[in-house]
Image: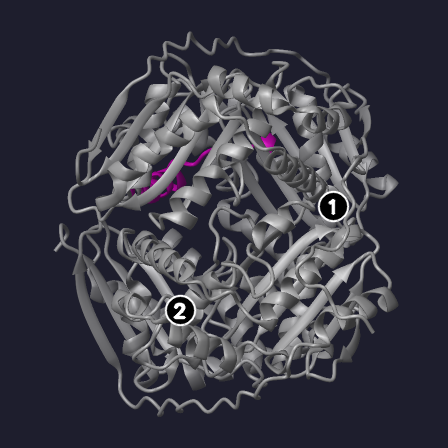
Amino acid sequence: MTELNRKTAPDFKEIDSINFQLPDISTLDNSIPYIEYNLGSQELIKIDLVFRAGVKYQSKPLQASMTSEMLREGTTNFNSLEIANKIDFYGAFLETDLNSDFATVSLYALNKQLDYVLPMLKEVVTLSNFPKKEFDKKINIKKQKYLIGQEKVETLASKAYSHVVFKGTKYANHTTLDSFDKISHEDCISFFNECYNINEMDIFVAGKVDSKVKTRINELFGQEALTHSVPEFEIGQNTYLPSFQFIEKKEAIQSSIRIGSPLISYEHPDFTKLKVMNTIFGGYFGSRLMANIREEKGYTYGIGSVVMAKENMGNLIIYTEVGTDVTQATLDEIRKEIKLMQTEKVSEEELYKVKNYLLGSLLQNTDGVFDQLERYKTLYYFNLPNNYYSKYIEEVRATTPEEIITLANTYLNDLSFIVAGSQSVS
Amino acid sequence: MSDKPQLNVTHLTSLNGGTKKIMIKFKKFTLKNGLRVLFHEDNSTPIATINTVYNVGAKDEEESRTGFAHLFEHLMFGGSVNIPEFDAPLQNVGGQNNAFTSNDITNYYITLPKQNIETGLWLESDRMLSLAFTPESLEVQRSVVIEEFKQRYLNQPYGDIWLLMRPLVYSTHPYKWATIGKEISHIEEATMEDVKAFFFKFYNPQNAILSIAGDLKFEEVKSLVEKWYSDIPEGIKYERNLPKEPKQTEARFLEVKRNVPQNAIYKAWHICDRMHPDYYAIDLLSDILSRGNSSRLYQELVKDKGLFTEIGAYQMGSMEPGLFIVSGKVKEGVEMETANQAILECLESVKKELTTKDELTKVINKIESTDTFNHMSGLNKAMRIGYWELLGDANLCNQEMEDYGKVTAEDIRRVAQEYLIDTNCSTLYYLSESNS
């Protein structure tokens, strides 16, 4: 037997395709979109009802989040305990999720229990009545959590980041301690009436779905005639100006750093290659930022850079928490790494590694029916073509070192720097 | 505590739960050097998982050198004897990895495209063989861990609770320190000799279990594992001999003041170990008390009486005799004593009255559905069979649901009466400086 060569990596195969499947797309009788992934390996199902009821639609802080969180707290037929009992008894999960653009109400259940809990899903999205008593308890709890959050440097930095980068738009976070006194259960009722309109929702179903599921959903949601009433909405003009902000938090032993700017989103032809550039810079564990600031200097437990895409704009966030004594050094190193991205060509070896990493991530992120559904939602809500992911693979593969330099010069620019901590930096 | 931040992975809690209907089928073999290997064939995914659990946790540390198991976990990414970097070759084939350390175990995992499984075995086997032990790696990971200590335990409101609770509850057993360590100085003082000694004591094939899941064939996996792991020296078997915690005989109490906005209360009772027959009844008791919005503590203390803004109950699930915890944040203006009494009253009711059939069915149903969800993930399955093998027998993971099903209302009342008693309890009042 020949001796084992441990120094050389074994042969491997590149990822050249992924098994991304498209869902079955149809409508209910009243033309509500019904999108189904029947791919499950286990006897369970997830139903997402997606509403255009994200934070950007609210007329005052906390309105969208309180409405979303109050959905399980009472309807005209059931009180909060009855709703919880029903869902919990059948081993199901009824969850609400909220982001800047969308509010989602999700039901997870074993197939054999679905019939028992499905009516409750309809109940909460159509008949929620936001009892004042429940609202008052919830807002108090939320206020306490807010106060705890205010003790964290990362919360302070994130909020300042939002003010700076999303300035002028509905994406900026304006919540203050005051907001908790200015919001009432009536605000939830009006937001619910305006934005949780089943005529405007999308239904996504994923798991091991038998043919009776759509019939049941159609009985529940597909019979009422549709009356379209999309609320008027303007995102607002982004009046971003690059700036430097220091937020003092006395006695903090670490500083929180947020650096970023507004950015392009999916609709822009550079978007995929921009992701390749950002991955090299700060988008994975082997990135430049992580290699330098964590693995070489040991300044932090973690650092990264993310390209985000909201419905109306994109944004870049570089984030880290570092020791107070090395905050200035970290800022200097981040600036140095940006400069390096803009001036020196990435080696073929590093670029190749990042491409393989990105495609491996795509493979991992399309593993399983719930992941496939989430990837499809991106296509659906950003109006991307069905072959988007195969084009993505091609574009990632085709990215050149020269393009990376151009992208770094175009997009790692006009950045704002935000630091929350106990010692001032520049 | 995981080695790398910002990765969305399944946590230890998902090891709980099981089912009789959905089994994890697996094959097992043992190499001559003592390495136990489990393989679960899973045709539903293009991703393969390689999970390695080492039978070493913070409980195996010396009291003067705590935080070592976790610091060591970081060093496992600093290059091995033949391969200068661990992450880069894996990223190059589309793989990802992470690890975590608990008081009981250190667990490493890789997920990667199934066609590249050999790259993962090459990397994972080389760091079982030996590490690079470079001084640079030690220096850097030492600082990273110190920053982690600050970020998670010191610079967070309520972050030091477990640093306070553990030594209150345990007087003797090494569960008395947290995984991150008792104090930063232990990490600051770690030397290369300490690091090497730790490696050779714990990191050998006899002290590890390798579990693999994916759309692969058993013969292929077996031959690759033999290729990469057979020549690793078996090492010396580690015999664990930990001091036993003496029975607690009177209530303990600690009060601290911190710069936090809200008072909090933590209560802990000693319970049985993981393999004890009472484990399942205790687990269901915690679910009845606090799982979901219909649970008793939430309904009574948050909703009805409005004394707490959040409250929870859970058992730690540790391998050695563990803890049952009730903890909550007390609503502004409520006296600590009132809050404490309200918890005790709620517990008194589960000691007096039997839980109803519906309540028991509810918590069992929840465990069954959670378990079904967990079966969707290859990583979860690989981790679970490895963990159970370490507990004694991987086959037992397929019996858990049955064991939950056997629990009666009488069992739940009995464990509440037996374990949740005052003389077995430690209480921490974590007070807000501004409120008091």
Q: Which secondary structure class fits the magenta region best?
A: helix
Residue at the spot of label 1: A368
Residue A129 visible, this orientation: no
Type of amino acid at the residue the image marks with label 1:
Gly
Type of amino acid at the residue the image marks with label 2:
Thr
Residue A241 drawn above or below residue A400:
above
Left or right, residue B60 beside residue A357: left
Q: Chain of mark 1?
A: A
Q: Nearer the viewer, residue A26 or B29?
A: B29
**Is A138 part of what is drawn in magenta?**
yes
Residue at the spot of label 2: B179
Q: Position of residue A116 (x, y in %)?
A: 71, 49
Q: Position of residue B190 (x, y in %)?
A: 33, 70
CA separation in Å, label 2 and label 1: 33 Å
User: Tag 1's secondary structure?
Assistant: loop
Residue span colored magenta: A125-147
Q: Chain of mark 2?
A: B
Discs 2/1, front: 2
In which quarter of the view is residue B431 placed? Answer: bottom left
Q: Nearer the viewer, residue B143 or A400?
A: A400
For the C terminus of chain B, the quadrant is bottom left
User: Tag 2's secondary structure?
Assistant: loop
* Residue depicted at x 46% and y 83%: B321
Residue B134 visible, this orientation: yes
**Total residue callouts:** 2
